[in-house]
Image (cartoon, rainbow, N blue to C red):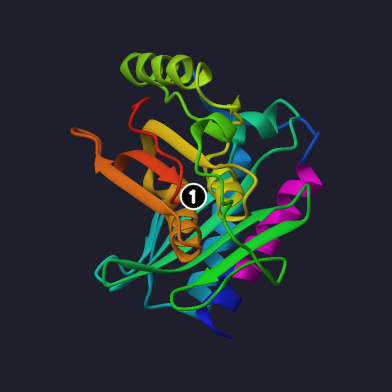
Amino acid sequence: MTDLELATHAALEAGKLLRQNFGSDATVDESTEHDIKLALDKESQDLITGILLGACPGDALYGEEGIAGNQKSPRQWIVDPIDGTVNFFYGIPHFCVSIALRVDGEIVVGVIHDPMVGETWTVEKGGPALLNGRPIAASKRDSLAESILFVGCGKDEEALRTGIERFHRASLRAKKMRMMGSAALGMAYIACGRLDAYIESRISLWDIAAGKLLIETVGGTVDLTPVAGHEDAYSIVATNGKVPLQEIL
């Protein structure tokens, strides 16, 4: 089994778990002002970890729910077991599993799986970006006035303020704005032409690793700026490679 096949298998198995539990009473492990952690987050990551490290026991795994494996390995799986946990908890069927593989610091495999819609985006460095096995392409829209933008607001006061200000500026210029609650799915939507750009002032690596490779493979751009004081957190500007965002940033 190739790395891409392994990641896809793990994402699909985790997706089955999430779909089976969607709509049931989920156990909340942690609740903060703007976020929720579910017991199912950990259960999903444990399932993914067992599949990935079971096949590749010398690898490292870095996920939203913790680390596993050999952390000195040049091969590191980057996992978000439920991207869109709040959506999941409130019964909104917009969430996904995101898995990427980073080798010697470079992302070489990405998988994003939406278990509710039955869509799976896959990509391997040097190969095509696919949706359910079919090649995809970013949109050709090059005008902000014709574009649909996805804006995230973050979870602390500064990030929320920046996100709302950007949303306001962009709303005056873009065709439509969206806040949907899953960064990984937002990036997958850019890669297949449904959305045109995504901006957020603070997002974690596991949310965007697979999506970054998807977007760049189809000719889009992903600019990441590290956020001081927050390990593996970034400010992100992702586009189809054509939409000019300078006037709203």
Residue appearing at x 60%, y 39% in the figure: 39
**Frontmost residue, 195 versus 154:** 195
Residue appearing at x 46%, y 61% in the figure: 219
Residue at the extreme bottom of the image, as rendered: 1
Residue range (magenta): 8-21
Magenta segment's dominant SS is: helix
Q: Does residue 158 sit above or below 219 in this rendering?
A: above
Crowding near the residue tagged with mark 1, few <14, some 14–19, many ≥20 C-alpha atoms within 10 Å: many
Query: Which quarter of the rendering shows the C terminus?
Result: top left
**What's under tag 1, amino acid-wise?**
Asn
Residue appearing at x 27%, y 66% in the figure: 105
* Left or right: where 249 falls relative to 111: left
**Frontmost residue, 148 versus 101:** 148
* Left or right: where 223 falls relative to 101: left
Q: Which residue is mark 1?
A: 240
Q: Does residue 157 sit above or below 133 in this rendering?
A: above
Q: Does residue 216 sit above or below 157 in this rendering?
A: below
**Frontmost residue, 153 versus 244:** 244
* Left or right: where 240 falls relative to 19: left
Q: Is residue 171 visible?
A: yes
Question: For residue 128, which quarter of the picture?
Answer: bottom right
Residue appearing at x 77%, y 39% in the figure: 22
Query: Which quarter of the rendering shows the N terminus?
Result: bottom right
Q: Secondary structure at mark 1?
A: loop
Q: Position of residue 101 (x, y in %)?
A: 43, 67
Q: Position of residue 110 (x, y in %)?
A: 50, 64
